[in-house]
Image (spheres, coloured by chain):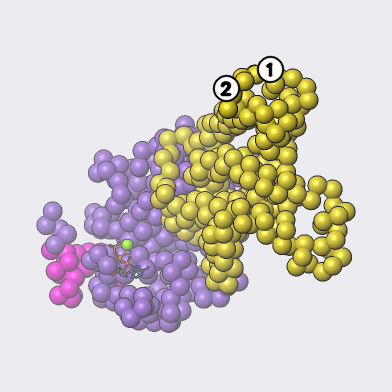
Chain colours: A yellow, B purple
Amino acid sequence: MSAYNWNWAVIVSEPYVGWLLDGLAVTVMLALSSWAIALVLGTVIGLARTLPSAPLRWLATGYVELFRNIPVLVQMFLWFFVLPELLPREAGHWLKRDLPHPEFFSAMVCLGLYTASRVAEQVRSGITSVPPGLAAAARASGLSLAQTYRYVLVPLGFRIIVPPLTSEFLGIFKNTSIALTIGVMEITASSRQIESYTFQGYEAFAAATALYLLLALLLLFLTRRIEARTRIPGWIARSNT
Amino acid sequence: MIEIRDVSKWYGSFQVLKSCSVSVARGEVVVVCGPSGSGKSTLIKGVNGLEPCDEGEIVVDGLNVGVKADLRVLRTRVGMVFQNFELYPHLNVLDNICLAPMVVLKRKREEAEARARTLLGRVGLTDHALKFPAQLSGGQQQRVAIARSLAMDPVVMLFDEPTSALDPEMIKEVLDVMSDLARDGMTMIVVTHEMGFARRVADRIIFMDAGEIVEVRPPEAFFTAPESERARAFLSKILEH
Ligand SMILES: Nc1ncnc2c1ncn2[C@@H]1O[C@H](COP(=O)(O)OP(=O)(O)OP(=O)(O)O)[C@@H](O)[C@H]1O
Ligand SMILES: [Mg+2]
């Protein structure tokens, strides 16, 4: 057994630095596209959980319980390996062969739908922590249920959940690393690749860690600005979380 | 103007309203009083359908509260002021007042704002149009809430203990606004423990106890010679202090 040969130059030399940057780009694209799905779907499902209609509530609750309780790693495998086999032959074929980067799209759908279940929980808790008298006042002045959501419950509910939502947003960046298990070349996968080519694993993972930290700092800065911008003068949210 | 006929309501097996009947004429001011839990809030929330009744019917200005299409129109003509003001915390004073006129009555912003400013003048808050609710005192918030209701040009105003959440020194400014309204001929139903206001402003007093309307009488008669033992007991309790 020989001593480890440190060589930090590896991570800034070609082609490895390119691999890291490509990994970073894939991580960012995967996180942002999954987040778009999570935010839209999670909002719809979270709002559905607060509606008067019981069947809609049950459906939405079913979704949340299903996706929240299966480990993400298992969901990743289900989407990538199992789904194409369950679909009709044609569609399965298309997913595996014709769709460019099937692993990327599987990971995007997987992380999007999983995070949607978590966003939905936040949205529900935000809406239910709006003091009920406000909705009563809106209804009493003639606003319909939909208008009450649009002008009162949603603007207030979302302001209440800006902090937990931003932490979900940060979380989706971390969860993108799970996509390496189905072959997505994001940051972590890239650094593993560098390790296996150069045997400089410590440097490669240090670089990956630094990139994640940098991302986190950048996002933290962005989300702080959003929090400051959505703050209501003098109002302290009576949040129940 | 307001017809309440044989209205009953239950929460589970507990009967909150027991066959209540009363009618209120145009321009009349009626004060509802009675012990805590007697059903006062439930009764006036029945008038705009916030608490639907199980039996009997309520008709306001020819519109039946129990009919969905009627209820929508009715709510635009019946204003309600709540104990806790229920101003929308994310909107400034002007937007609080303009929301329902713009969304429900489809008024243009300039028109709605012009009206809002007139009403703010009327409740003595001209200089506070751009403040947020949390930046105002309780008495100011309640006056904004009254202006907000008036912006819909209601034919009836309902007040549910509008001064109960206020510090003593702010009660008068709110009662003064209400007295002005009454003098201008507004039809009003007011739940309140302010017996001085009731004596001066009310045309009739409704006394409720345990879900029943026990007495409906002019204030002088009610205060000097209550008919029922229950009203006597209630009055001796609240006039003591
Ligand atoms: N949502 C509800 N579920 C069950 N019981 C209720 C509900 N709302 C009110 N009640 C009960 O109905 C009764 C009448 O309530 P209501 O609020 O109308 O009384 P109130 O006369 O306005 O009293 P207060 O002076 O305390 O405001 C009370 O005993 C109350 O506990
Ligand atoms: Mg009450």
Residue A9 — which label?
A: 1
**Main structural element of the magenta stretch: helix, strand or loop?**
helix
Q: Position of residue A135 (x, y in %)?
A: 49, 56
Check the image and report above or below for A72 versus A203.
Answer: below
Taking the image in four quarters, ligand 1 sits in the one at bottom left
Query: Residue A30 lies in magenta, yes or no?
Result: no
Quarter of the figure with residue A204: top right
User: Is residue B170 depicted above or below B185 in this figure?
Assistant: above
* A35 or A88: nearer the viewer: A88
Which residue is located at x 59 percent, y 24 percent? Answer: A2
Residue at (41, 60) in percent of width and height: B158
Magenta stretch: give its range.
B215-236
> Mark number for residue A3?
2
Q: Is residue A11 left or right of residue A60?
A: right
Identify the element where label 2 is drawn: loop
Q: Is residue B234 magenta?
A: yes
The residue lying toward the viewer, choosing from A108 and A20, is A20
Residue B186: x and y, percent? 44, 57
First in residue order: circle 1 vs circle 2: 2
Q: Is mark 1 within 8 Å of ligand 1?
A: no
**Is residue B229 found left or right of A21 in the rendered image?**
left
Choose top left, top right, bottom left or bottom right for residue A9. Answer: top right
